[in-house]
Amino acid sequence: MAIYIVGQSNLRIILETDVNLSTNDTLLIKYKNPEGTTGSWSATISTDTSKIYYDVVSTTDINIAGKWYFWAHATFADATVGKGAAASQTFIKEGDV
């Protein structure tokens, strides 16, 4: 399992959905941080149309150590909504083990 450090600004979060997302209007990666705060980032569809990703570019995007949860949220052209099951990843502080 990969170890990730909080405060990185060169990281890609990828979620696989097993659904063709090419007919969507809005793609989001939603999250819940270790303090329970929720939010979302605009996602980009991968060349494999069942995957979406978000490129972390700010050191403040993931700035709290602990277990984070990420899930896909898609709104399709016909106004239907698809939501994925959450995946988790633990982030640690720099210098921790």
Image (cartoon, grey):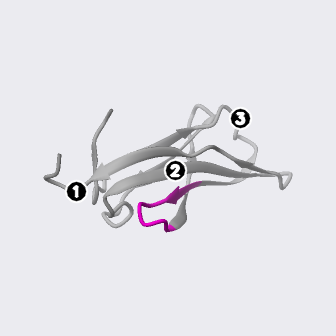
> Which kind of residue does numbered mark 3 sit on?
Asn
Residue 95 located left or right of residue 43 = left
The disc at residue 8 is none
Q: Residue 85 appears at what percent x and percent y?
A: 62, 43
- The residue identified by callout 1 is 93
Residue 59: quadrant of the picture: bottom left
Q: Amino acid at mark 1?
A: Lys
Residue 20 forms part of the magenta stretch: no
Mark 3 and mark 2 lie on one chain; the one further toward the N terminus is 3
Q: Residue at x 33, y 63 (%)?
A: 64
Residue beneath disc 2: 70
Determine whether the residue tagged by mark 3 lies in a helix, strand or loop.
loop
Residue 39, given in percent of the width and then of the height, sits at 54, 65
- Give, as a single range, the part of the protein colored magenta: 29-37
Along the viewing direction, whichever of 50 and 95 lies nearer the viewer: 95
Q: Is residue 50 above or below residue 63?
A: above
Residue type at tag 2: Phe
Task: Answer left or right for 38 relative to 21.
Answer: left
Rendered-image quadrant of the N terminus: top left
Instruction: Identify the residue at the far left of this view.
Output: 95
- Reading the chain from its start, which is encountered first: label 1 or label 3? 3
Q: Dot 1: within a 10 Å radius of its alpha carbon, few (fewer than 14), some, or many (20 or more) residues?
A: some
Q: Residues within 10 Å of mark 2 (few under 14, many from 20)?
A: many
What residue sits right under mark 3 in the picture? 20
N-terminal label among 2 and 1: 2
Residue drawn 63% across the image and 34% down it: 50
